[in-house]
């Protein structure tokens, strides 16, 4: 499913126009992104939670040349599925 298909599904399920569903989806994604940028955790009961994790700097290897490279420390977004979502998938 891509973003357009998701917007169609939201519009159909909630009885909204596609434009309204698009604005609602974009607003939700923006709110989640802003919260994660601040370092906060976003929890949606039954669906899952988004959080930010820190990765330490490390050394890696370029697979083409075999050369050792340094990989910088960075923050990464993580998602952990909730119980209802996990049960629905399984």
Image: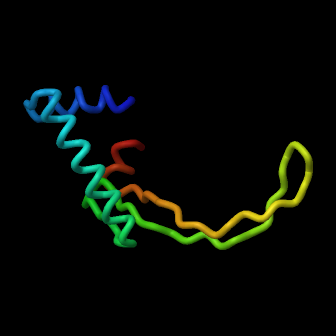
Asked if residue 19 is positioned above or below residue 27 in the image, the reply reads above
Q: Residue at x 87, y 43 (%)?
A: 64
Asked if residue 9 is positioned above or below residue 77 in the image, the reply reads above
Q: Residue at x 18, y 39 (%)?
A: 23
Residue 58 as seen in the image, left or right of residue 9: right
Residue 15 as seen in the image, left or right of residue 81: left
Closest to the observer, 24 or 46: 24
Residue that protrudes farthest toward the right in the picture: 66
Q: Quadrant of the N terminus?
A: top left
Q: Position of residue 26 (x, y in %)?
A: 25, 43
Residue 15 as seen in the image, left or right of residue 5: left
Q: Residue at x 32, y 61 (%)?
A: 34
Q: Residue at x 84, y 51 (%)?
A: 62
Q: Position of residue 84 (x, y in %)?
A: 30, 52
Which image quadrant for residue 14?
top left
Q: Position of residue 79 (x, y in %)?
A: 43, 57
Residue that protrudes farthest toward the left in the picture: 15
Indicate the colouring scheme: rainbow
Which image quadrant for residue 37?
bottom left
In this rendering, the count of numbered labels is 0
Q: Quadrant of the C terminus?
A: top left
């Amino acid at each position: 499913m891509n973003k357009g298909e998701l917007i169609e599904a939201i519009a159909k399920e909630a009885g909204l126009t596609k434009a309204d569903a698009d604005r609602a989806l974009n607003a939700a994604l923006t709110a989640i992104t802003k919260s994660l940028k601040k370092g906060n955790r976003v929890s949606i009961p039954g669906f899952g939670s988004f959080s930010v994790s820190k990765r330490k700097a490390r050394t890696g290897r370029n697979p083409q040349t075999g050369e050792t490279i340094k990989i910088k420390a960075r923050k990464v977004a993580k998602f952990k599925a909730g119980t209802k979502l996990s049960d629905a998938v399984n």
